[in-house]
Image: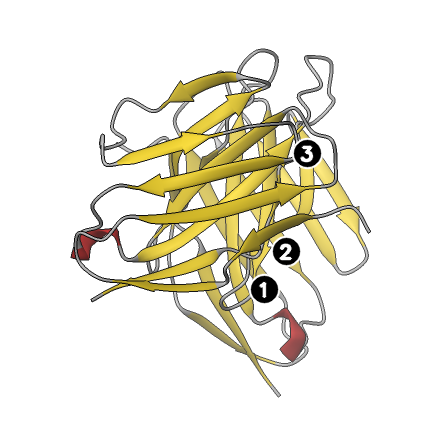
């Protein structure tokens, strides 16, 4: 089945120790997103790639970086995790349909729950 | 003011009840409205969507949008324990703006 896969599902890191989360997709979608979701909060968009074009949200800290080496894979790098970065990190993909009533459905992966000690 | 507001609940109902989940939004440019369901420790999955105003029905679920009042609703009939999850509303304006704006989500528990 076509899907969005995230690895690992659970990640524990130490304060200040770099960590990389990965996302892969078999949907061949050209847009990939990274969201941060804290308990009882809405997913917060960190950045997204439209093909190879990187789009950073204005309020995303510099501590968060991303790489997309090819269509299928996207990585989230947290250079120096702080206690406040503990959250669920969600990867999503979509293929924008343009206007006229066609929805840009975003498909989410299962998420990676990050714990910072 | 956040662009999409949603009462986080929690909401607890008995099995078989009719559930009403609601959001309001402030951006008049929004045209696409979605409901995502998120089970505990899982990613959100798209449940239903509507384009502009109107109703859409899918089995026990009905999504309703009233653009004049900027109000989004999801109704669940004959609720089941398996419906227990967080329900997130989301919206975007479509076209070149494909990013979603989410509400905080409402935690629903359906008790057997």
Q: Quadrant of residue B77?
A: bottom right
Considering only order in the chain, which callout, 3 or 1, is on the residue closer to the N terminus? 1
Residue highlighted by disc 1: B19
**Is B108 rendered above or below residue A28?**
below
**Is A42 rendered above or below residue A88?**
above
Q: Are marks 1 and 3 on the same chain?
A: yes
Cα–Cα gap, marks 2 and 3? 13 Å
Q: Quadrant of residue B14?
A: bottom right
Residue B46 can be seen in this image: no
**Residue shown at the point (50%, 50%) measured from the top left:** B88
State the image coordinates of residue A44 (x, y, percent, origin top left). 37, 40
**Residue shown at the point (59%, 34%) measured from the top left:** B33
**Residue shown at the point (27%, 31%) measured from the top left:** A60
Evaluate if marks 1 and 2 touch, with contact meaning CB atoms under 8 Å apart: yes
**Residue shown at the point (52%, 29%) measured from the top left:** A68
Which quadrant of the figure contains the C terminus of chain A?
bottom left
Q: Nearer the viewer, mark 1 or mark 3?
A: 3
Evaluate if marks 2 and 3 touch, with contact meaning CB atoms under 8 Å apart: no
* Left-right relation of A13 to B110: left
Residue highlighted by disc 3: B50
Residue A58 can be seen in this image: yes
Q: Which mark is residue B75?
A: 2
């Amino acid at each position: 089945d076509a899907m969005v896969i995230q690895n690992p599902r659970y990640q524990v890191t130490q304060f200040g120790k770099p960590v990389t989360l990965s996302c892969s997709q078999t949907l061949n979608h050209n847009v990939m997103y990274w969201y941060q979701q804290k308990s009882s909060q809405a997913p917060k968009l960190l950045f997204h790639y439209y093909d190879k074009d990187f789009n950073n949200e204005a309020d995303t800290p510099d501590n968060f970086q991303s790489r997309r080496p090819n269509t299928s894979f996207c990585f989230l790098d947290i250079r120096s995790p702080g206690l406040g970065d503990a959250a669920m990190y969600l990867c999503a993909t979509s293929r924008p349909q343009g206007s006229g009533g066609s929805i840009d459905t975003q498909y989410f992966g299962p998420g990676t729950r990050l714990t910072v000690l | 003011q956040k662009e999409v507001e949603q009462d986080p609940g929690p909401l607890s109902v008995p099995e078989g009840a009719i559930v009403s989940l609601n959001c309001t939004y402030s951006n008049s440019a929004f045209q696409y409205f979605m409901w995502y369901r998120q089970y505990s420790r899982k990613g959100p999955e798209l449940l239903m969507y509507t384009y502009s105003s109107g109703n859409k029905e899918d089995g026990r679920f009905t999504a309703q949008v009233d653009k004049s009042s900027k109000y989004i609703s999801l109704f669940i009939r004959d609720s089941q324990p398996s419906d227990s999850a967080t329900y997130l509303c989301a919206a975007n304006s479509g076209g070149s703006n494909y990013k979603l704006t989410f509400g905080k989500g409402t935690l629903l528990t359906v008790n057997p």
